[in-house]
């Protein structure tokens, strides 16, 4: 039996916190992981026995039942009925208590459950961090009158502090790129920001390099509802710790760290975030390399080791083989002894795909299946990595070997078109649609995956090609180039002046 | 039945706070209102059923019996046997709970008792503010770095 227990103190009277938490369906409103929620069967959210059915941001669906609700001792107990995660006999309890010397609230969230053997620690970390701690932070943000603990806060020039001492107390000033309103690359606007002093469990980073990913484009356009107008996009960066908050262990001021994770907010020169989200950077890996490759390299790591443990001798087809993730998948697959075929949209990108280990490169104008079959003597590719999406699955399927595996891990060219699952029988094929958030779901998994990536980089098995490097303030130009498919390899924004360039 | 409840946040881990509070004979070590204390009948301080016999700074003598001690829940309960306070059926509970997002502990001290209705407010004040909050304030200072 696993027990997870997290607790915090919120700077608000109990009544305010309870008003927000009490309704079993209202987590839709405050918990960042929850996309949509409803109570089944026309029941009220405070009716003991009611069932909430909700979807997470990644689309997975859960059902939970309210087992007990108390206004006398504010809190509730609930259990999971259905979940995509293997959390068995999961019962959780939320409990609030007055801190009587100060109008604050003690909030405890705990649960017990069982897991498949070996999954205890990663699932415990996932529940504690992504559900409970993320919930604490969201409620604290919601209740705070001023958005002080939510990461970089936008300040207008007129209210920017002027005295140096005031600056130190109020926060660390820097620049950030905000999405002024949802739209095209032109909405990315430079603003003065400040990173608040790190709270308990948090660190403050001076960021040197920031990775640009397609998900940032989706943030900007609103395709993924991850930020609101005025918010800062970006999920990947590297830099140096300025200071650490209370309770942070194993990290100190001056340490070099990197991260690749939600929530967005990376397009900034300074940032305050949870210490659990970052990994320490080995000395041999530059900040720009880490910011360029952490997300894409960890993606390559789990695709080739966890989603499809690649065997030497297999034939691999990599779409967008000169892209950020693509060129790393090619190199890593080659290093593992696979035969790599690359597909690129533009013939100009063939050279990078070849340099990355592709023995054959197929360009957009050619018939994919015909070429793959020609190269493989009619067998087809054993595994196909497709980060393009759209209608590409059909093309991939035609190029697949019998008992082959299609791994669809992105949709750079648009949402996946419906695919007839029954058709898989034509080749006894497998189709995977992995989600980074699940493979990088716990600190332990991130540590393992990033560790493998860093050793591959340090040993020279992987080389990160940075095709475009721009100052942070030119984020809009970076997006234009990425969206118009003009970039090769990784795109990086630099911040912090001379030493990072 | 009258109830008093006081809670606070102490800037130290629950382990360290509990190490101080679990000593049923240790009140004078940390509570400014207590002058001295001993356990009757030479029993150990952590033996459930032991009686502590102590004096407050103003000379009052109080005897209390340990009803429950839990190193698992970091909780203890005790009852007043004799005191000059004029309370009956007095049972108090002291509990320490970890705050996991920082090196802090949540502490709660509550009591239930019967008393002369005319003295209820005065007793709530004495016990809640004087004894419980006074103790927590001393603990906060003790652990302030």
Image: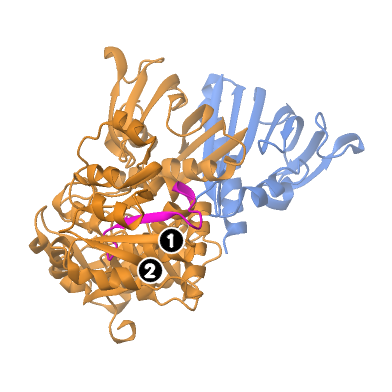
> Residue at the bottom extreme?
A498
Q: Quadrant of the N terminus of chain A?
A: top right
Taking A314 as reference, is A480 left or right?
Answer: left
Image disc number at residue A357: 2
Majority secondary structure of magenta residues: loop
At label 2, counting other C-alpha atoms closer than 10 Å, the crowd grade (few under 14, some 14-19, many 20 or more) is many
Chain that bears disc 2 = A
Q: A454 and A345: which one is in front?
A: A345
Residue A116 on image: x %, y %: 58, 34
> Residue at the front extreme?
A377
Residue A492 visible to an observer of this rendering: no
Residue at figure coordinates x 64%, y 32% from the top left: B93
Does the segment drawn in magenta span residue B38?
Answer: no
As helix, strand or loop, the secondary structure at mark 1 comes to helix
Q: Count how many numbered circles sit on residues in the image.
A: 2
Query: What letter labels the chain drawn in blue?
Result: B
Q: B62 and A344: which one is in front?
A: A344
> Residue at the right extreme?
B42
Q: Which of the 4 quarters of the picture holds residue A268?
A: bottom left
Residue A335 on image: x %, y %: 47, 66
What's the magenta region? Answer: A306-323
Query: What letter labels the chain drawn in orange?
Result: A
Taking B19 as reference, is A455 left or right?
Answer: left
Chain that bears disc 1 = A
Q: Is residue A77 above or below residue A110?
A: above
Residue A361 on image: x %, y %: 28, 64
Image disc number at residue A76: none
**Does the CB distance between marks 1 and 2 fall below 8 Å?**
yes
As helix, strand or loop, the secondary structure at mark 2 comes to loop
């Amino acid at each position: 039996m696993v027990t997870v227990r997290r607790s915090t103190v919120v700077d608000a009277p109990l009544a305010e916190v309870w008003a927000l938490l009490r309704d079993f369906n209202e987590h839709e409103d405050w918990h960042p992981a929850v996309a949509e929620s409803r109570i089944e069967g026309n029941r009220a959210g405070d009716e003991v026995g009611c069932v909430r059915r909700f979807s997470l941001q990644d689309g997975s669906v859960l059902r939970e039942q309210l087992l007990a609700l108390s206004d006398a001792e504010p809190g509730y107990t609930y259990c999971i009925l259905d979940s995509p995660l293997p959390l068995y006999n999961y019962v959780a309890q939320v409990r609030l208590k007055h801190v009587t010397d100060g109008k604050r609230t003690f909030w405890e969230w705990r649960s017990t459950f069982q897991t498949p053997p070996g999954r205890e620690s990663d699932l415990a970390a996932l529940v504690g961090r992504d559900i409970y701690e993320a919930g604490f932070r969201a409620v604290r943000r919601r209740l705070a009158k001023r958005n002080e603990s939510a990461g970089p806060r936008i300040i207008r020039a007129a209210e920017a502090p002027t005295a140096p001492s005031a600056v130190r107390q109020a926060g660390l000033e820097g620049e950030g790129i905000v999405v002024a309103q949802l739209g095209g690359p032109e909405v990315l606007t430079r603003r003065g920001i400040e990173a608040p002093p790190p709270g308990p469990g948090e660190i403050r980073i001076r960021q040197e390099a920031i990775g640009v990913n397609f998900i940032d484009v989706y943030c900007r356009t609103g395709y993924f509802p991850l930020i609101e107008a005025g918010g800062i996009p970006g999920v990947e960066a590297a830099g140096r710790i300025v200071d650490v908050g209370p309770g942070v262990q194993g990290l100190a001021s001056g340490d070099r760290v990197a991260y690749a994770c939600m929530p967005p907010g990376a397009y900034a020169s300074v940032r305050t975030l949870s210490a659990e989200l970052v990994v320490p950077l080995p000395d041999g890996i530059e900040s720009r390399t880490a910011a360029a490759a952490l997300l894409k390299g960890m993606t390559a790591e789990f695709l080739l080791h966890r989603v499809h443990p690649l065997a030497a001798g297999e034939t691999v087809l990599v779409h967008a083989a000169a892209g950020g993730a693509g060129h790393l998948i090619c190199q890593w697959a080659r290093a593992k002894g696979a035969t790599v075929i690359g597909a690129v949209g533009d013939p100009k990108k063939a050279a990078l795909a070849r340099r990355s280990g592709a023995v054959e490169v197929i360009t957009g104008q050619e018939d994919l299946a015909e070429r793959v079959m020609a190269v493989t003597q009619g067998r087809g590719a054993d595994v196909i990595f497709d980060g393009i999406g759209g209608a590409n699955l059909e093309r991939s399927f035609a190029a697949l070997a019998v008992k082959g595996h299609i791994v669809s891990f992105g949709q750079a060219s648009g949402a996946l078109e419906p695919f007839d699952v029954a058709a898989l029988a034509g080749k006894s094929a497998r189709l995977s649609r992995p989600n980074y958030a699940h493979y990088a779901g716990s600190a332990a998994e991130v540590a393992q995956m990033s560790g493998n990536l860093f050793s591959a980089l340090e040993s020279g098995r992987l080389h990160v090609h940075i095709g475009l490097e721009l100052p942070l303030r030119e984020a809009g130009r970076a997006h234009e180039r990425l969206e118009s498919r003009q970039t090769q390899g990784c795109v990086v924004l630099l911040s912090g002046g001379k030493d990072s360039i | 039945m009258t109830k008093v409840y006081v809670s606070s946040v102490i800037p130290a881990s629950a382990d360290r706070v509990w190490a101080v509070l679990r000593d049923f004979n240790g009140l004078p070590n940390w509570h400014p209102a207590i002058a001295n204390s001993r356990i009757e009948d030479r029993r150990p301080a952590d033996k459930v059923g032991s009686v502590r016999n102590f004096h407050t700074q103003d000379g009052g003598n109080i005897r209390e019996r340990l009803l429950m001690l839990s190193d698992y829940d970091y909780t203890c309960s005790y009852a007043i046997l004799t005191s000059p306070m004029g309370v009956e059926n007095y049972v108090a509970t002291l509990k320490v709970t970890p705050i996991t997002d920082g090196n802090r502990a949540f502490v709660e001290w509550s009591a239930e008792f019967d008393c002369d209705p005319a003295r209820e407010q005065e007793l709530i004040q004495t016990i809640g503010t004087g004894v419980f909050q006074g103790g927590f304030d001393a603990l906060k200072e003790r652990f302030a770095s």
